[in-house]
Image (cartoon, helix red, strand yellow):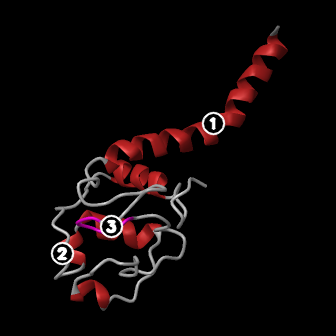
Amino acid sequence: MKHLAYAVAAGFLGFAPITAQAQDAAAGERVFLQCRACHQVGETAKNGVGPQLNGLFDGRKAGTAAAYTYSAAYKSLDKTWDETNFTTYIKDPRGVTPGTKMVFPGLKDETQIKNLVAYLKQFGADGKKK
């Protein structure tokens, strides 16, 4: 019986990283509700007030979403999105990129930012979940 308990515990531990990642993405989806007024993700995503965010962390350069009219501030950026620069940006978009059209005041909570990144990372450039 004691061995069964260890086996069960080991089984749960083996799934812990997958569960944590899924929970983070699910929590990130809730954080994304703040972004939805301007941004979309997924297979039917379109540009709105802000550009669609599919494939954001797949080597996408800032200011390059097709058919979106970026501010001069964004057009002049030489940045490829990654977790580090996105985290810095999302905390204070207007402070990081003066002249941006983005009016969002920023997301300050580190856990929410990590969860948002986990959610956005699920979407490839085609909008399909990876």
Residue sitting nearer the eye, 96 or 62: 62
Say which amino acid is labelled 3: Asn
Q: Residue at x 38, y 80 (%)?
A: 62
Q: Which residue is mark 2?
A: 101
Q: CA distance from mark 2 to mark 3?
A: 14 Å
Q: Which badge, 2 or 3, comes first in the chain's sequence?
A: 3
* Up-down relation of residue 6 to residue 18 (above or below): above
Q: Which residue is mark 1?
A: 16
Query: How busy is the neighbourhood of tag 2: few (under 14 within 10 Å), some, or many (20 plus)?
Result: some
Residue sitting nearer the eye, 15 or 46: 46
Q: Which residue is mark 3?
A: 47
Residue sitting nearer the eye, 25 or 87: 25
Q: Which residues are magenta?
A: 48-52
The reply to whether the magenta stretch includes residue 49 is: yes
Q: Check disc 2 and report its element: helix, strand or loop.
A: loop
Q: CA distance from mark 1 to mark 3?
A: 36 Å
**Left or right of 44, for residue 92:** left
Q: Position of residue 53 (x, y in %)?
A: 40, 64
The reply to whether the magenta stretch includes residue 91 is: no
